[in-house]
Image (cartoon, grey):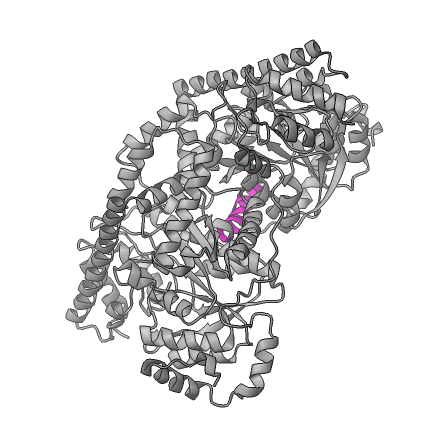
């Protein structure tokens, strides 16, 4: 091998290196684009002045602009240019977990007083789900995860990459554009005892269809009988009803029934901290001692993935949640965001009805949270894109946060155009 | 129906009857046995994760945990590689404060999701910082750079990509290496082997062993290289030795995966510390690089770093980037914005960049002077042994050569906290605390064998 290098040294290296390495990458196929983020990419590249982005679930104000919440601005001004000692950051991290978990179980919950939960900060909702999926696989290597049909597209990727096989269970009824409740209960009943389920506690993504409180009670009871493990992904607390406590009610019902649960929380939407990647994962435990064990395992999984989560977002969230005035301001701002979305839902539905659309658009106001599962077909979605520069995912999911008083008429007209012949 | 589950209220009765309709056909009595036999079942409130045992403490972070618990006024934390000032305090660089105030005062800034690959401006600037502004590979679009969560995140994403797409699943890591390396690679799906690196006899590089081990590695295997300031040993190859390593690796088609956590800390000069990586890029071959800004910009908690993959062609680089996105999206969707914004603000502004290089050199110089002071203190005490490695080793750490018994002794008797492999973080020392450490080492060497 060394003989080759005596005369044509450098060319010989790169030739042999290139021959060897070229074939290593031939098999790398171009990856499919993410169905959600690619919508935003395409939108950004579009130069049309009437374009509307109803793709990613990110809140916009009535001018269609991203919003930095006032409570966040205040929190940021406080911490800018400050010293953060590393020892402070671990106290701050615990504060974040404590305050986050209060949002899930209620601030006076016994679970919190007795420390009967293992809680860690996570990289927003995605990171929390992935940590849990890895943890599930580590301790239940033969288990599967049941997901709603449909669910957020990245849920499939997360559990797949954690090597946990998935099953689906009935959820959305395409005819009623509401909940397929009896089929849901059948699937829960027929799943093997002790199965893991991924549930959306409020503002279901992508359908906007949530069970009623009564329906949640029945589901919870059945879970208890079947000893299933419910894992809640709560990305939109506050956006379903405008009330943070009310949006966590489904989780509390499960806990009251004696179910032992896990929960992923995200502050991306309800605190507008999308880019900061702040969230929390908690798993209910028997006692504080077990909580320490589970927490240590979760931290170990995180350590080999990214070591620790980014401090800035944690400082913002814990600063806001632990200051009563700032927290009160936040609660108001969440309600305002939810109200704006709700009012545009009403306006859009009315506009379509006023255009004498042949279709039923009740689901626009029946569905809750950020999304409307419009029922539009892929062909209709494509027409909206090409002819009207309106962007949404192919499944017809519209982010209502992208609708404004300025663009709602245009949107209604466009939808009417592509659907008026059925 | 199981009587435990019934409750006296009428809403519960309603629920039960609705449930009974759904459960018609399910034989509850026989099911009871199989329910209780199932691992996730149990009495009310019994967690399905009851069998989870407590994981072991991370050996490095565990040192800080133990240190924090110690009430002694003379305690010294020489564990984790985080820079400390002469006063023993963490340091937020002035240039970072300036950048942060710029960001907070900019009313047009928003907090939207970054793209999956992160902040584009940050990515370009990071690549230039390591590869050089005029690097042909960059100009030819052969480099893909994605923002990741500091060094750990960059290593993990790179390793996951290799496990999925590279034809060889074996990675060779130096012996010893940072404790988290084998865990990261194993969990990413690679199989980990080692190559000889540190020679305890000379407290320097076992170059012959390294060459032998890499020569016998299977063709195409991945090799982890510390770009500079090797952690934990502080022992770096010379430029001549790097050149030999490069030739050997290219001849065997071994894939270099550089971990650069200390650019600027080794010599005090960012370009000088980038030389080994640049040598590998200059020969036209491919490589992976994990960069961290935790130490050299003091942005530890912000988790800011980058993974770069240098490819043969621009087309390959584009395809590779698209696949990196598929690794990242199911892990955490997109990276955090704050640290990237700070780094980009500093790197793109000439004045801020220059200020940074000055502050960085000051940190590196302080560490070098601590090395000198410790060496002299041991010499002054007549501590047995050759301690010249303290001034020869490079970067934040000194691999003292102390054994774990000696380390325990120093912790117990002198409240010195360090990892049991004898590694000390020089950044944790100050002129005031050097004498205490020298006393501890002296006592350990004389009393413990």
Residue B435: give x, y in percent of width and height.
61, 15
Q: Is residue B65 left or right of residue A383?
A: right
Residue B310 visible in the displayed image: no
Along the line of sight, which residue is nearer the eye, B370 or B309? Answer: B370
Residue B120: give x, y in percent of width and height.
43, 37
Q: Is residue A147 left or right of residue A377?
A: right
* Location of residue A115 with respect to A345 vertically, above or below: above
Magenta region, main secondary structure: helix
- Whether A103 is among the magenta residues is no
Along the line of sight, which residue is nearer the eye, B139 or A191? Answer: A191
Residue B248: give x, y in percent of width and height.
76, 30
The residue at 48%/66% (across/down) is A260
User: To which quarter of the image does residue B57 belong?
Assistant: top right
Indicate the quadrant containing the C terminus of chain B: top left, top right, bottom left or bottom right.
top right
* Location of residue B352 with respect to B40 vertically, above or below: above
Residue A72: give x, y in percent of width and height.
29, 42
Residue B406 visible in the displayed image: yes
* Residue interval drawn in magenta: B314-330
Determine the residue located farthest toward the left in the rendered image. A354
Along the line of sight, which residue is nearer the eye, A101 or A193? Answer: A101
The residue at 71%/21% (across/down) is B443
User: To which quarter of the image does residue B91 belong?
Assistant: top left
Q: Is residue A322 left or right of residue A33?
A: left
């Amino acid at each position: 091998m060394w003989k080759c290098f005596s005369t044509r040294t450098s060319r010989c290296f790169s030739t042999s290196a290139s021959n060897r390495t070229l074939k290593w990458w031939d098999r790398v196929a171009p990856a499919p684009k993410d169905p959600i983020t690619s919508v935003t990419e395409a939108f950004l590249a579009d130069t049309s002045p009437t374009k509307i982005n109803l793709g990613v679930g990110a809140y916009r104000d009535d001018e269609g602009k991203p919003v930095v919440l006032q409570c966040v601005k205040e929190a940021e001004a406080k911490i800018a240019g400050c010293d953060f000692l590393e020892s402070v950051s671990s106290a701050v991290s615990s504060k974040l977990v404590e305050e986050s978990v209060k949002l899930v179980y209620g601030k006076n919950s016994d679970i919190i007083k007795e420390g009967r939960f293992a809680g860690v900060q996570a990289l927003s909702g995605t990171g929390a789900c992935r940590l849990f999926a890895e943890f599930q696989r580590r301790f239940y290597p033969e288990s599967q995860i049941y997901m709603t049909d449909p669910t957020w597209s990245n849920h499939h990727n997360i559990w797949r990459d954690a090597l946990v096989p998935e099953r689906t269970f009935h959820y959305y009824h395409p005819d009623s554009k509401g909940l397929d409740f009896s089929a849901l209960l059948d699937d829960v009943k027929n799943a093997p005892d002790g199965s893991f389920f991924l549930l959306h506690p409020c503002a279901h993504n992508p359908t906007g269809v949530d069970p009623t409180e009564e329906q949640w009670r029945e589901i919870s009871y059945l879970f208890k009988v079947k000893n299933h493990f419910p894992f809640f992904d709560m990305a939109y607390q506050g956006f379903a009803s405008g009330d943070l406590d009310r949006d966590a009610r489904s989780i509390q019902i499960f806990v009251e029934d004696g179910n032992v649960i896990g929960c992923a929380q995200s502050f991306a939407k309800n605190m507008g901290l999308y880019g900061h990647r702040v969230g929390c994962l908690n798993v209910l435990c028997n006692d504080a001692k077990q909580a320490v064990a589970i927490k240590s395992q979760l931290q170990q999984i995180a350590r080999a993935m990214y070591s620790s989560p980014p401090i800035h977002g944690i400082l913002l969230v814990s600063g806001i949640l632990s200051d009563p005035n700032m927290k009160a301001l936040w609660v108001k701002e969440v309600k305002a965001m939810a109200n704006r979305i709700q009012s545009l839902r009403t306006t859009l539905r009315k506009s379509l009805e006023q255009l004498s659309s042949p279709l039923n658009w009740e689901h626009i106001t029946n569905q809750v949270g950020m999304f409307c599962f419009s029922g539009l077909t892929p062909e209709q979605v494509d027409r909206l894109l090409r002819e009207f520069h309106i962007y949404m995912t192919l499944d017809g999911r519209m982010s209502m946060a992208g609708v404004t008083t300025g663009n709602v008429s245009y949107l209604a007209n466009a939808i009417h155009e592509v659907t008026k012949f059925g | 129906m199981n009587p435990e589950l019934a409750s006296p209220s009428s809403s519960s009765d309603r629920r039960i009857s609705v449930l009974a309709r759904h459960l018609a056909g399910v034989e509850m009595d026989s099911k009871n046995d199989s329910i209780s036999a199932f691992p996730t079942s149990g009495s009310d409130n019994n967690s399905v994760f009851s069998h989870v045992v407590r994981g072991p403490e991370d050996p490095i972070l565990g040192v800080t945990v133990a240190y924090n618990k110690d009430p002694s006024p003379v305690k010294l934390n020489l564990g984790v590689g985080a820079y400390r000032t002469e006063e023993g305090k963490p340091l937020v660089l002035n240039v970072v404060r300036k950048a942060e105030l710029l960001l907070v005062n900019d009313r047009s800034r928003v907090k939207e999701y970054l793209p999956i690959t992160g902040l584009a401006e940050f990515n370009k600037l990071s690549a230039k910082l390591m590869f050089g502004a005029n690097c042909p590979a960059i100009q030819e679009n052969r480099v893909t750079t994605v923002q990741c969560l500091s060094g750990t995140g960059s290593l993990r994403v790179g390793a996951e990509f290799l496990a999925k797409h590279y034809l060889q699943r074996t990675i060779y890591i130096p012996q010893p290496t940072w404790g988290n390396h084998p865990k990261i690679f194993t969990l990413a799906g690679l199989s980990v082997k080692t190559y000889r690196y540190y020679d305890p006899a000379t407290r320097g590089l076992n170059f012959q062993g390294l060459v032998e081990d890499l020569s016998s590695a299977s063709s195409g295997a991945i090799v982890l290289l510390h770009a500079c300031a090797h952690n934990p040993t502080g022992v770096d190859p010379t430029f001549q030795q790097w050149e030999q390593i490069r030739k050997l690796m290219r001849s065997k088609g071994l894939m270099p995966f550089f971990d650069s956590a200390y650019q600027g800390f080794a010599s005090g000069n960012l370009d000088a510390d980038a030389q080994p990586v640049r040598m590998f890029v200059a020969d036209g071959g491919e490589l992976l690089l994990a960069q961290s800004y935790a130490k050299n910009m003091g942005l530890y908690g912000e988790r800011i770093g980058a993974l770069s993959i240098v490819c043969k062609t621009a087309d390959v680089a584009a395809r590779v980037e698209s696949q990196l996105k598929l690794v990242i999206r199911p892990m955490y969707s997109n990276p955090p914005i704050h640290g990237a914004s700070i780094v980009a603000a500093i790197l793109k502004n000439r004045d801020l960049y220059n200020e940074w290089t000055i502050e960085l050199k000051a940190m590196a110089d302080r560490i070098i002077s601590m090395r000198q002071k410790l060496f002299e203190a041991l010499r002054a005490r007549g501590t047995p042994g050759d301690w010249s490695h303290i001034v020869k080793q490079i970067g934040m750490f000194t691999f003292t050569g102390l054994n774990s018994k000696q380390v325990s002794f120093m912790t117990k008797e002198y409240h010195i906290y360090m990892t049991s492999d004898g590694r000390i973080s020089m950044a944790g020392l100050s002129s005031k605390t050097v004498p205490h450490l020298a006393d501890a080492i002296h006592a350990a060497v004389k009393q413990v064998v």
